[in-house]
Image (spheres, rainbow, N blue to C red):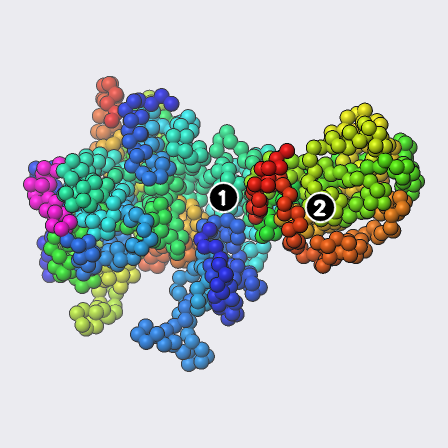
């Protein structure tokens, strides 16, 4: 596994936080995904062996939790909330705008490789609906117009060097 | 009667200009003074204060916090754990977000007082994966607190030690269920446990006695330790004490978070006065008062009955606007206070489609462990999806209700009720729309009707 | 497990019937005791309780008492103490006996619960019955007929999941049929200690899977097929071969080792189709190894002997017995018995050795025990040979001592009851030096060298008993008739005994047992038919000092490890 040294030391620290090593599987999956971008086959087996559990025990979790992915995604990750409050405030329209701007379908990498758009469940900011997370930043009151503006910004930033957190 | 003013105890510093999440700012504002006083008292006293306060859980179940602490098995010799439920995922709820992102030390202080009271030596904050910034803020705050001996092996020189760690979830609503959370923390698939025998207070995290409390609840503990349980119990209404943060979303002029004494304002006051009423040209149609799992109320409904006020039984005859926003009153009218997430829908919303949206949420979030919820939630979703995108039949409403009736009360955890109640209540209250939906779809849609499914 | 049952008895009330059960008994087991069936899928008496199928929902209640005085509240209508029934049903598998517990399994609420759960289970279940092996022994079929509503209201699209996935060499998985009870996962983790199975995805899309690249191939994988309540897990060997309702079931014993796992042989019209475990809570619970299930293939094996032969020529049994007797009564006879022979056969073998004044050898087979249901002694019935007196010490050193006697001329004829002397250690030259009478099922070097060959029967073709490592005598029965040309071992042995001057003994298990009970002290109190289905423990004390090879397995802990170490070969 080709992980950055910083990731490895954070993994080592994470394991110490629990009396039972298996508990560290979620933190380790987050750290590995942040590092290499997704949870590969190799990552599943590496994490399993690091924690003394079976690979199936890790595999079971990867597909259960929507935040873990088995394949790389676009450079920017756009998550539009689809649950009731955001939906009644126009969330579906917002999502359609993002898809249209990049010519992409939900869950796929856009043709230019720049974004993956996902329609996710409640992001717990219903008062400022519709909400969108772009990478780790929350954007509020994203109506169709604001969505288009955000798409422009993403496209502009695409020219700049990668600034993904 | 005009609505009372907000009573911002928990949210005192939220959105305050110049207030920051660092320890220095918190200390400047009197932070950790309550912890300092608390660790000089006997732990049993603090538990008594919380019992006297009548504090009810703010995560959704409204279970009395003091009673929960009393149920903890203190005889087994096993370590006792505290798990902070920061997995805020109930649709319509967005209060814990602001506590975590803007006032994390309040949560830490409340948690440490709770730990001291219950002789807990290790606490985990299970924070939803979609709060990455919140997790970083909390980690930093805990580190600062540890450096100042407010968390860690020797808190304020007392010899009492308690460690606190942040543990991120990864996008599953069922991790908000206390035993699902515990399974997730243990590194397994978050399948809720059967109770009996796996009550967290007895067989929780690593099969040790565990307290699982909501973020807001733990913040209230701080204030109870500060003002005393009796003083706290005088805030709000009897059996529904303290303040709570109402999260209003949907079709109102001013959606957002508002902290009031529990039960001291009515639905009408909240929606009309505080939130400015419906959007221009619209009328309120329906409101879900306690997160999407709560049963819906239809504007125009009337609720009649008798309730206890002081020592007497008093008759009530309420419209939706008249219902006081407390656990018991909302329970009496057939819904619940839940997580405090108030979702408002106006006449542009098709209730069939709104239910379709909710059903999609629950079927997506069902963990799949037990038969009724797993199959029933997806069946209900397929019915409403077919109604909206395919052929709707007049009897689909009755079928939906019948399916929901087979789920509630038959499952391992409360998710069964959570996914069944919306369907049951939407069909019960808006049955006419369900029957007429097939026909209504053929006519041009309502002006500005949002796509929901 | 939630709580193992202890021996204190508690009285509970189920559908008005009182039943006393040990503390910790769950309500499914308690109901079973009074003949009440509580339908269930995920519960299994030998696995941990998960309570996820929700089929066993029942009503529970406690007797009503006045909260202040604790006095019982009487129902004026019946004159009996009122029962406060809980509004919410509870799962019977996780409800353990408590004093005063009342359970209702036939109320309208319970009926609704069952109809609801059945409907939900069938909602995404494929219409596979016509092509599904499980038909006829499928819990979904049985319980939907018994407790379901009888019609479906589902008109949506069913979920599609992978079908016909080969999970391992012996197990086929059809994910659409899976009802996600998790019995297979729990079995692999808790019993087979091979954690390879798990669930992926979520909700109704949850799918059973093996980790990609791994296979379900441990030697207990087929037990998951047995316990799968539906046709999701099926045996690749049995797939599409036969409908179970045509099959006759016969009780038998796994002959792989001295564990003596109880089995069930399924056959139709003389052909065996499969072997499954038979429950014996004292020996093998509800499990058996995969390797024991294929043993029936030996019935129609390539090398199966098909005719009685004397000096290579096919002949009649009587002639062969006479020829064998002539060879053996010349003097210098030796008897090689088998740890795979039944107690009855070993009894007759001993009679034969006595009549010939010959010494008897047993061939030992020692391997590695797996700690579960295969012990280190790969003979199923060495203890039978000890108890009948055929041998008085454990076999060791192979057949070296016999070989030495052959070389020195002390032994000139050998009768072997089912053992290949060459495989057991005799050299080709030693084999050539003696006249051999071979009674056995398959062709081998010994049958090729033998002057008299009498084909005999496999364990599936005859009746008998074995004594396992616990000194438990257990019966096995004939499942299929013997192949043409083969003779029942007891018949040929009894005739031989008579022909060499020994007593005339009966050749069927029934009559033979009168003689066995009369002559073998340890078996004095029994008859073949009196031995219960779960076997009978006999007193092993007379042989307690022997260094038996077995280590611990399920339900067996060896008594004296020191003796075992000392006598290690």
C376 left or right, relative to B270: right
Sequence-wise first label, 2 or 1 = 1
Please, which chain is the residue tagged with disc 2 on?
C
Q: Which residue is mark 1?
A: C190
The percent position of residue B307, horizontal first and vertical second, equals: 23, 69
* Residue C386's disc number: 2
Image quadrant where one finds the C terminus of chain C: top right
Q: Nearer the viewer, residue C487 or C229?
A: C487
- Image height of B395 relative to B313, above or below: above
Asked if one can make out residue C213 in the rendered structure from this viewpoint, the answer is yes
The percent position of residue C534, horizontal first and vertical second, equals: 64, 54
The picture quadrant where one finds residue A118 is top left
Viewer-nearest of labels 2 and 1? 2
Residue at (20% x, 45% y) in the render: B160
The picture quadrant where one finds residue C272 is top right
Give the secondary structure at mark 1. helix
Task: Tell me the distance, in whole angstroms, between the alpha carbons under discs 2 and 1.
Answer: 36 Å
Q: Nearer the viewer, residue C282 or C78?
A: C282
Mark 2 nearby-residue class (10 Å; few <14, some 14–19, many ≥20) = many
Residue at (48% x, 38% y) in the render: C195
Q: Which residues are magenta?
A: B21-40
């Amino acid at each position: 596994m080709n992980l950055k040294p910083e990731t490895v030391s954070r993994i080592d620290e994470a394991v110490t936080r629990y009396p039972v090593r298996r508990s560290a599987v979620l933190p380790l999956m987050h750290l590995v995904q942040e590092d290499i971008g997704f949870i590969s086959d190799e990552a599943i087996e590496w994490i399993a062996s690091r924690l003394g559990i079976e690979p199936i025990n890790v595999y079971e979790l990867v597909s259960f939790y929507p935040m873990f992915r088995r394949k790389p995604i676009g450079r920017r990750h756009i998550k539009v909330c689809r649950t009731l409050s955001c939906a009644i405030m126009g969330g579906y329209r917002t999502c359609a705008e993002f898809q249209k701007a990049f010519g992409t379908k939900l869950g796929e990498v856009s043709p230019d490789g720049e974004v993956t758009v996902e329609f996710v469940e409640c992001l717990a900011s219903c008062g400022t609906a519709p909400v969108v997370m772009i990478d780790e930043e929350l954007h509020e009151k994203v109506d169709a117009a604001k969505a288009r503006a955000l798409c422009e910004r993403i496209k502009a930033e695409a020219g700049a060097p990668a600034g993904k957190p | 009667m005009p609505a009372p003013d907000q009573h911002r105890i928990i949210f005192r510093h939220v959105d305050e200009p110049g207030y920051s999440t660092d320890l220095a700012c918190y200390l400047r504002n009197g932070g950790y003074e309550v912890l300092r006083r608390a660790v000089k008292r006997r732990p049993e006293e603090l538990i008594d204060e919380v019992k006297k306060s009548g504090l009810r859980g703010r995560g959704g179940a409204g279970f009395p916090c003091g009673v929960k602490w009393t149920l903890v098995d203190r005889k087994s010799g096993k370590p006792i754990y505290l798990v902070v439920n920061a997995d805020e995922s109930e649709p319509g709820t967005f209060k814990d977000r602001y506590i975590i992102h803007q006032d994390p030390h309040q949560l830490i202080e409340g948690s440490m007082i709770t730990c001291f009271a219950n002789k807990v030596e290790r606490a985990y904050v299970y924070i939803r994966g979609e709060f990455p910034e919140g997790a970083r803020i909390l980690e930093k705050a805990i580190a600062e607190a540890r450096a100042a001996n407010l968390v860690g092996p020797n808190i304020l020189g007392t010899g009492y030690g308690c460690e606190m760690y942040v543990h991120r979830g990864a996008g599953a609503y069922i991790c908000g269920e206390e035993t699902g959370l515990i399974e997730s923390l243990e590194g397994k698939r978050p399948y809720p446990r059967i109770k009996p025998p796996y009550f967290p207070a007895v067989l929780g995290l690593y099969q040790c006695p565990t307290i699982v409390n909501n973020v807001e609840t733990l913040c209230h503990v701080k204030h109870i330790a500060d003002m005393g349980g009796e003083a706290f119990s005088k805030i709000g209404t009897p059996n529904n004490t303290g303040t709570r943060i109402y999260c209003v979303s949907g079709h109102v002029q001013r959606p957002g978070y508002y902290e009031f004494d529990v039960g001291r304002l009515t639905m009408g006051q909240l929606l009309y006065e505080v939130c400015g009423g419906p959007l221009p040209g619209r009328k309120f149609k329906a409101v879900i008062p306690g997160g999407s799992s709560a049963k819906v109320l239809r504007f125009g409904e009337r609720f009649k009955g008798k309730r206890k006020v002081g020592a007497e039984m008093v008759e009530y005859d309420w419209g939706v606007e008249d219902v006081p926003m407390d656990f018991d009153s909302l329970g009496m009218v057939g819904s619940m206070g839940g997580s405090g997430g108030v979702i408002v829908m106006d006449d542009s919303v098709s209730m069939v489609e709104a239910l379709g949206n909710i059903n999609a949420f629950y079927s997506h979030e069902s963990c799949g462990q037990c038969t009724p919820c797993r199959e029933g939630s997806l069946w209900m979703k397929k019915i409403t999806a077919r109604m909206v995108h395919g052929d709707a039949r007049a009897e689909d409403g009755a079928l939906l209700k019948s399916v929901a009736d087979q789920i509630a009360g038959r499952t391992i955890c409360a998710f069964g009720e959570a996914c069944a109640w919306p369907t049951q209540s939407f069909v019960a209250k808006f049955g006419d729309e369900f029957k007429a939906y097939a026909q209504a779809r053929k006519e041009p849609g309502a002006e500005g009707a949002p796509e929901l499914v | 497990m939630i709580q193992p049952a202890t021996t204190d008895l508690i009285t509970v009330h189920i559908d008005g019937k009182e039943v006393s059960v040990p503390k910790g008994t769950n309500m499914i087991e308690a109901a079973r005791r009074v003949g009440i069936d509580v339908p269930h899928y995920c519960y299994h008496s030998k696995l941990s309780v998960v309570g996820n199928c929700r089929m066993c929902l029942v009503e529970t209640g406690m007797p009503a008492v006045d909260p202040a005085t604790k006095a019982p509240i009487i129902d004026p209508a019946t004159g009996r103490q009122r029962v406060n029934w809980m509004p919410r049903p509870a799962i019977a598998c996780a409800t353990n006996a408590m004093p005063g517990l009342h359970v209702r399994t036939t109320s309208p609420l319970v009926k609704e619960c069952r109809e609801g759960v059945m409907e939900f289970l069938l909602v995404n279940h494929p219409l596979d019955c016509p092509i599904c092996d499980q038909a006829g022994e499928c819990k979904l079929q049985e319980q939907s007929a018994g407790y379901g509503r009888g019609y479906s209201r589902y008109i949506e699209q069913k979920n599609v999941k992978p079908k016909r996935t080969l999970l391992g060499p012996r197990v086929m998985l059809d994910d659409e049929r899976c009802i996600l009870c998790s019995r297979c996962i729990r079995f692999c983790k808790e019993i087979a200690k091979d954690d390879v199975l798990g669930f992926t995805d979520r909700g109704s899309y949850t799918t059973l899977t093996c980790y990609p690249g791994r296979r379900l191939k441990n030697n207990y994988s087929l037990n998951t097929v047995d316990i799968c309540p539906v046709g999701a897990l099926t045996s690749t060997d049995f797939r599409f071969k036969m409908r179970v309702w045509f099959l006759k079931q016969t009780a038998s014993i796994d002959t792989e080792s001295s564990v003596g796992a109880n089995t069930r042989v399924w056959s139709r019209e003389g052909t065996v189709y499969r072997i499954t475990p038979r429950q014996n809570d004292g020996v093998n619970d509800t499990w058996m190894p995969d390797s024991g299930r294929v043993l029936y293939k030996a019935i129609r094996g390539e090398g199966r002997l098909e005719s009685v032969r004397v000096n290579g020529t096919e002949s009649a049994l009587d002639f062969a017995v006479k020829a064998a007797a002539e060879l053996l009564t010349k003097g210098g006879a030796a008897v090689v018995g088998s740890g795979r022979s039944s107690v009855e056969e070993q009894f007759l073998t001993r009679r034969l050795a006595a009549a010939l004044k010959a010494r008897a050898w047993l061939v030992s087979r020692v391997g590695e025990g797996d700690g579960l249901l295969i012990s280190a002694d790969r003979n199923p019935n060495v203890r039978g040979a000890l108890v009948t007196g055929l041998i008085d010490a454990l076999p060791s050193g192979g057949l070296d001592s016999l070989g030495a006697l052959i070389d020195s001329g002390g032994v000139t004829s050998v009768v072997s009851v089912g053992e290949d002397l060459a495989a057991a250690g005799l050299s080709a030259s030693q084999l050539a030096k003696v006249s051999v009478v071979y009674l056995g099922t398959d062709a081998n070097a010994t049958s090729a060298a033998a002057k008299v060959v009498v084909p005999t029967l496999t364990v599936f073709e005859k009746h008998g008993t074995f004594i396992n490592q616990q000194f438990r005598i257990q019966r096995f029965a004939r499942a299929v008739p013997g192949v043409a040309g083969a003779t029942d071992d007891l018949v040929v042995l009894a005739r031989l005994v008579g022909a060499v001057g020994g007593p005339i003994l009966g050749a069927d298990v029934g009559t033979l047992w009168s003689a066995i009970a009369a002559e073998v002290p340890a078996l004095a109190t029994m008859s073949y038919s009196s031995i219960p289905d779960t076997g009978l423990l006999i007193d092993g004390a007379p042989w307690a000092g022997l260094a038996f090879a077995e280590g611990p397995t399920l339900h067996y802990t060896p008594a004296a490890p020191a003796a075992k170490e000392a006598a290690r070969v």
